[in-house]
Amino acid sequence: MCTKDQTLANNGAGRNEGEEHMARCNGLSQKEGQDIMGDNFLSIEAVEKSFRIRFTPEESEALAEIPYTENTLRACKNTHLLFPGYPLKIPYIVRRSQWRNQKLFDTQLNSWCTQPVFAGGHQRFFQYERVCLRWYLTSRDIVAESTNKTYEKQRTLLWPNEFVPNATEMIYTITLCYLATNVRLFERIYARTVSVCDDRRIMVGFFGPNGLRVGCGMGYMCDRSENIGLASSYHH
């Protein structure tokens, strides 16, 4: 989690309006992003290799520049992952990860993906949510001090330039990180997402030997636990 001073830097404190406008418009090259983020940068090539997909020339062109400022990346280089999103839904994330020949997803998630017709409340986020074609800057951990709080209380901990990703985006993030680096994120904690299933917020995490788990809280307005924190990512 970035400090308040770092966040002020992220927002361009000390710049005049013209300088901040130029920083937003120009963006950074992928090499500049990689130089800053180091091991926390995952390239277009890493996504292609991990999910056995290929970005079209038009998609690659759309990702040519990274739309975050240098200050933002430097503030988050040790706490966040910077990576490109590819427009996949959850069943396709699962299928395109099977080449690894490991148990990457728990039994429940696999069963949801193999059902011919998605049932009940799972239908909306399984059928309609997808990863966006864009650069993501997503936290490797839950928001600081976000456990034992309701979802509404957790949201008050976000900075103005942060948002709560959906379940598909978090499954993509965690799976990509493991396929590309062999590192398991959220191994002993759930990260609550913005997605809803049967009036419950979807949680993603506890990525142990039995695979990544996806579940629901008891009720998205009131559920709290020491095992449930909040997922977060940065707006462009």
Image (cartoon, grey):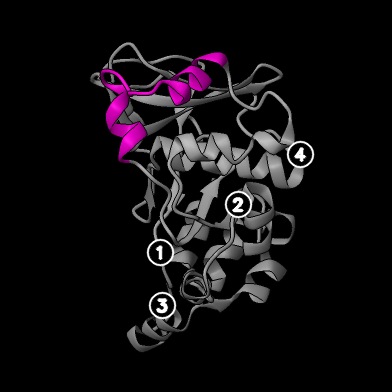
The numbered mark, 4 or 3, whose residue comes first in the sequence reads 3
**Tag 1 secondary structure:** loop
- The CA span between labels 1 and 3 is 9 Å
Circle on res. 182: 4
What is the crowding at mark 4: few (fewer than 14 residues within 10 Å), some, or many (at least 20)?
few
Most common SS among magenta residues: helix
Q: Residue furthest bottom?
A: 18
- The CA span between labels 1 and 2 is 14 Å
Rendered residue at 44%/63% (across/down): 8
The numbered mark, 1 or 4, whose residue comes first in the sequence reads 4
Q: Which residues are magenta?
A: 107-128
- The CA span between labels 1 and 4 is 27 Å
Q: Residue furthest top?
A: 218
Q: Amino acid at mark 1?
A: His
In depth, the one of 188 and 56 nearer the eye is 56
In the visual, does 112 lie left or right of 48?
A: left
Magenta run includes residue 146: no
- The CA span between labels 4 and 2 is 14 Å
Quadrant of the image for the C terminus?
Answer: bottom left
**Tag 3 secondary structure:** helix
Name the residue carrying label 2. 81
Name the residue carrying label 3. 24
